[in-house]
Image: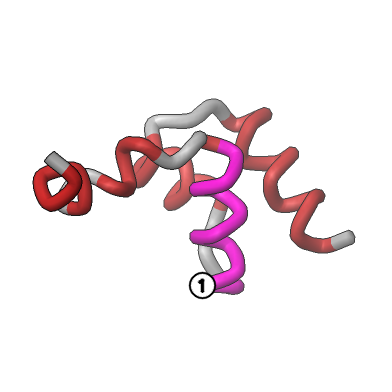
Amino acid sequence: IETALLGHADKLEPLDAKLVRLIKQTPGITLGELMQLTQCTLTEARVARFKVDF
């Protein structure tokens, strides 16, 4: 079971953690790109960006 779950680890990660990880991995990522990759809202993307910047 664990092997099968490893292939879907990104789906098990909480959205806010995923957003922060993506921003740290790609500092130049736009809010639009974050929204497209994660299906999050503009507000969620902005909050994540704020968390990483501070």
Q: Which residues are magenta?
A: 16-27
| Residue 7 rendering spot, x and y as whole percentages | 15, 51
The image's colour scheme reads: secondary structure
Secondary structure found at label 1: loop
Q: Is residue 21 left or right of residue 48?
A: left
Q: Is residue 36 left or right of residue 35?
A: left
Q: Residue at x 50, y 48 (%)?
A: 18
Magenta stretch encompasses residue 41? no
Residue tagged 1: 26
Q: Residue at x 12, y 52 (%)?
A: 3
| Residue 42 rendering spot, x and y as whole percentages | 60, 31
In this view, the residue farthest toward the right is: 54
**Image quarter in which the N terminus is found:** top left
Q: Is residue 13 left or right of residue 1?
A: right
Q: Residue at x 31, y 37 (%)?
A: 11
Judge whether 34 appears above or below 29 on screen: above
Residue type at mark 1 is: Thr
